[in-house]
Image (cartoon, rainbow, N blue to C red):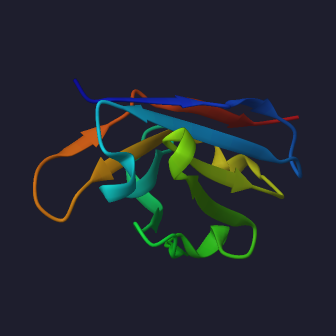
């Protein structure tokens, strides 16, 4: 049974940092492309970024480029999203997603990030 569990969310002040984690079980983690998505209140889900099986990563949200990185530790079956200089527009539920080139994708349950003073 595939399971993705996000953690690390919470309340942070503007300008602060957070490191989200997503730990997978039930999959050969190193074979999966991992993505982070977010869903702000009242809005649709958007792709934050992706990290491939080779460790190469990209950030897809223009407002997060330069202050957000994605990394993975295959030994720990975990992907990370490190965010800096957070602002209220970053408030969202953050989800991780796992997919191989063929086959279904899997979602975590999400972790809430709230940026507020």
> 9 above or below 28?
above
At x 45% / y 72%, what residue is drawn? 54
- Check the image and name the residue furthest to the top: 1
Q: Position of residue 111 (x, y in %)?
A: 54, 30
* Nearer the observer, 14 or 78: 78
Please state the horizontal and vertical placement of residue 113, each as a whole percent of the image: 65, 35
Along the horizontal axis of the image, is 12 left or right of 72?
right
- Give the quadrant of residue 35: bottom left
Residue found 75% across the figure and 67% down from its top: 67
Q: Position of residue 18 (x, y in %)?
A: 76, 43
The quarter holding residue 117 reads top right
Q: Does residue 32 appear in the picture of this structure? A: no
Q: Residue at x 69, y 64 (%)?
A: 68
User: In the image, is residue 35 above or below residue 62?
Assistant: above
- Tell whether 69 sits left or right of 11: left
Quarter of the picture holding the N terminus: top left
Find residue 108 and report its horizontal and vertical position in percent: 38, 33
Name the outermost residue toward the front: 75
């Amino acid at each position: 049974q595939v399971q993705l569990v996000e953690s690390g969310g919470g309340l942070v002040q503007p300008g602060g940092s957070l490191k989200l984690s997503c730990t997978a079980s039930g999959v050969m983690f190193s074979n999966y492309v991992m993505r982070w998505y977010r869903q702000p209140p009242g809005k649709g889900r958007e792709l934050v970024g992706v990290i491939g099986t080779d460790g190469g990563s990209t950030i897809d949200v223009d407002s997060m480029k330069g202050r957000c990185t994605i990394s993975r530790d295959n030994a720990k079956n975990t992907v990370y999203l490190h965010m800096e200089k957070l602002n209220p527009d970053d408030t969202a539920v953050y989800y991780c997603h796992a997919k191989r080139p063929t086959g279904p994708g899997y979602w975590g349950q999400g972790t809430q990030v709230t940026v507020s003073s």
